[in-house]
Image (cartoon, rainbow, N blue to C red):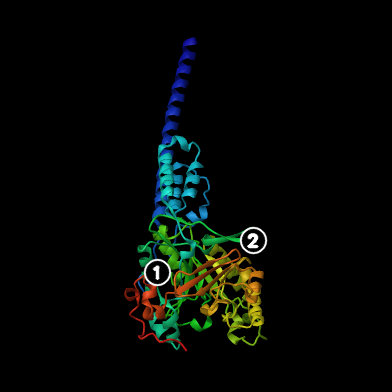
Amino acid sequence: MEDYRGRMRDTRRRARRRRAIRNRIILTVLLLILVVAAVILGKKFLDGDFKKKENTTFPAGTTNQTETAGEPGESTPAESGGAPAADADSALSQAAALAASYDYDGAIALLKSVSGYESDSRITEVITGYEETKKSLVAADITQIPHVFFHSLIVDTAKAFGSEKSAAYNQVMTTVDEFDAIMQQMYEKGYVLVKIHDMASKQDGEMKKGTILLPPGKKPFVLSVDDVSYYEYMQGHGFANRIVIGEDGYPTCEMDMANGTVQTGAFDVVPRLEEFIKAHPDFSYKGARGIIALTGYDGILGYRTAPKYGDPSDDSYKAEYASINVESEREKAKSVAARMEELGWEFASHSWGHKDMGQAKIENMKTDMQKWLDQVNPLLGGDTDILIFPKGTDIGSWRGYDNNEKYDYLSSVGFDYYCNVDGNQPWVQCTSKYLRQGRINADGFEMYYHADKLSPFFDAASVFDKARPTPVKPMG
């Protein structure tokens, strides 16, 4: 009997050893699978892997579907916020993405959130490298940061330059090919996109200059886009119709095609800049994007959000508006704006009716701005603090806004950042109350007549689209 029990004990021990060995093998295989998956996902995140769609017949680089900065559900460096990583490999991948956009502090904090990171030589070596890189960074002079701006991009040059508004489009618009070439040349010159809120911010009611740290040779700049409303007069003229959020969660555009279909693709600045940053993460400082300047009289972002679209008694009402559900349009616009803001885009008032605020009487300016505050600001979250002057005309001289009734009003309704148009780049004025910044237009008129002013950013002669009618005739 004792021998029997002994044999049974030996059998059970051998069975336990076999199970333990089998479990270790299974666990090892699972861990290898997880590591390989993390490496693949990390590489995909860093390389910007995405599904390409079939190209349209429009300018090179334009696609049917916006190429995105990641797969659906993936978080970008701007969205990650330094959340603890699941393991060392994914943490290293995410940290590399943060460091690529100059967020070394965020990258280091992320790596240090990994349990037991001190004993992982890979992590400690990377942290040491980031710490050394931080020592070489140079603080940018806030007063020397330029601001380049665009309008909606011309996709179909034949339609735009063949329309009744050809002269206007030729003067103030930029084509898709020109925009792509400008971004590439600015990138090659070392420019890095920053937010205007990186330049200065209100702290305890006082505007204080910010700190922007970049490697030697890198040059910060701000980018903005005016009139992103896709006005009624632009329909059928070779522009996008509206901004939408694609299935991948990133902004793209819808556009009417000549064959009567509506296609989705990177047909304007927002999705094209997203694509460029995805391919060149070091073009964006800590997830910065551009500023979108919005009026309100035809709605925003291509959505017909203005009251006139749902009010037959309005003097501007047209019979074709009957099919428009204004409340639905507002909800869609609000959703698109919220997603864009998550990705780093900022919004600005461009007045409601695109009125010259420098020339307007103050009561007329107040009336117009109140419409913007009531109809547009709520769709953007209600906290807009950037004002981009329509027609580029400021409300004061270069001396500042002291004893300025218009400024007092605009400040009282929440504006702290003011942007005019000034070809002398850079032009920045930062006081304890506000920040002012001059902008330069990268459009047909400037490229044709003032290439020298644009030369710090790009070579206008090589960028200039040969589809443009020449000479570029000034409007009015």
Q: Which residue occupies the foreground of this view, 111 or 142?
A: 142
Q: Residue 303 occupies which quadrant of the picture?
A: bottom right
The answer, for residue 50, to whether it is visible in the render is no
Q: Which mark is residue 205?
A: 2
What's the residue at 40%, 54% (across, down)? 215
Contact flag, marks 2 and 1 (Cβ < 8 Å): no
Residue 369's place in the image compared with 221, above or below, is: below
Q: Can you say whether 377 is above or below 83 in the image?
A: below
Q: Is residue 255 above or below residue 165?
A: above
Residue 169 got which mark?
none
Secondary structure beneath label 2: loop
Amino acid on which the number 2 mark rests in the picture: Gly
Amino acid beneath label 1: Thr
Q: Which numbered disc, 2 or 1, marks the residue closer to the eye?
A: 2
Q: Residue at x 41, y 37 (%)?
A: 121
Decide: is 233 above or below 249: below
Counting from the top left corner in percent of width and height, residue 182 is at 38, 70
Please identify the residue farthest to the top as the structure is shown.
Answer: 2
Could you tell which of marks 2 and 1 lies nearer the N-terminus? 1
Mark number, residue 63: 1
- Callout 2 crowding tier (Cα within 10 Å): few <14, some 14–19, many ≥20: few
